[in-house]
Image (cartoon, grey):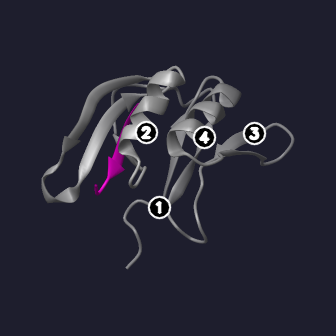
Amino acid sequence: MNNTICWTDIPVTDLDRAIVFYSAVLGTQVTKEMAGPDCAFGLLPHAENNVSGCLTAMDDNKPSQNGPLVYLSVEGRLDAATDAVKANGGKVLAEKHQIGPYGFRAVILDSEGNRIALHSLS
């Protein structure tokens, strides 16, 4: 079975700042890519055909604290990831807490103003 969620675009206003922020929070490099001469984006790390997404600066897609909540895996490093949020211009909206048998999450505000959940099983 395929994943229900197959991709996500995370809207940003400052692509370079967002790449630094997400690289620190995820603990791995977010790469700046080009899709044509005028379309830069930050590709979130993933292996092969794993679900992932990118950081996009587009006029019709703006950062928001409302709407869908995207969960990003920071497996085994949720505490370090929330520390990186604070150190890189973000804000922790809900500290690490258990979500039943599904592990733990923290809800953050990224450097661009998006509400994002960070998830880890431990």
Disc 3 from disc 1: Cα separation = 20 Å
Q: Which mark is residue 6?
A: 1
Eye-nearest disc, 1 or 4: 4
| Position of residue 55 in the picture relative to residue 122 (left or right) | right
Of callouts 3 and 1, the N-terminal one? 1
Disc 1 and disc 4 in contact, CB within 8 angstroms: no
Q: Residues within 10 Å of mark 1 (few under 14, many from 20)?
A: few
Of callouts 1 and 4, the N-terminal one? 1
Of callouts 4 and 2, the N-terminal one? 4
Task: Check disc 2 and report the residue beneath it.
Answer: 80
The answer to if 5 sits in the magenta stretch is no
Amino acid marked by disc 4? Ser
Amino acid marked by disc 3? Ala
Chief secondary structure of the magenta portion:
strand
Above or below residue 75? Residue 68 is: above
Of callouts 3 and 2, the N-terminal one? 3
Amino acid marked by disc 1? Cys
Disc 1 from disc 4: Cα separation = 21 Å
Q: Is residue 58 visible?
A: yes
Above or below residue 89? Residue 85 is: below
Q: Residue at x 37, y 79 (%)?
A: 1
Task: Check disc 3 and report the residue beneath it.
Answer: 40
Tell me where the magenta segment starts and ends, as one range.
114-122
Eye-nearest disc, 3 or 2: 2
Q: Residue at x 47, y 61 (%)?
A: 6
